[in-house]
Amino acid sequence: MYIRIQDSLAQRMISEAELLNVGCKMEKLKPEKVVEILRKRGMDISVEQGAQMLELLRKFANIIVFQHLESQKHDAMRKAI
């Protein structure tokens, strides 16, 4: 089973430009930044809700990365046969 996030809040929450504004080095997005980003888009949430959203998004990201790596591993095994 693959998880696909279509037109979700997660996709609308962070644009590519906003991700680049986090900095050159990879940094964890903070709940306060999520609140700021969403407030600019007309949504008012608490810092606690921002933290919960980030936790869920990180879980989704881990699942998606795992699925991708498993797919790559299976593709490599098929090619080897």
Image: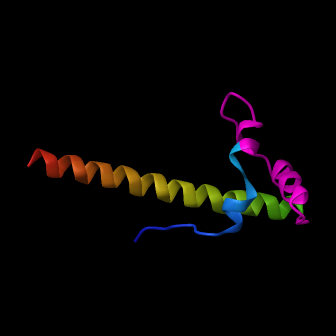
Front residue (pair 58, 12): 12
User: Which quadrant holds residue 12?
Assistant: bottom right
Look at the picture and state if 80 lies above or below 21. Answer: below
Which image quarter holds the N terminus?
bottom left
Q: Residue furthest top?
A: 24
Residue at figure coordinates x 64%, y 59% from the top left: 57
Which stretch is magenta? 17-45
Q: Residue furthest left?
A: 81
Q: Percent position (x, y) of residue 47?
A: 87, 58
Q: Is residue 15 above or below residue 9?
A: above
Q: What scheme was used to colour the molecule? A: rainbow
Say whether residue 69 is left or right of residue 8.
Answer: left
Q: Quadrant of residue 22?
A: top right
At which x and y percent is residue 6? 58, 69
Identify the residue at horizontal 80%, vertical 59% (top origin). 50
Q: Would you say residue 27 sits in the magenta stretch?
A: yes
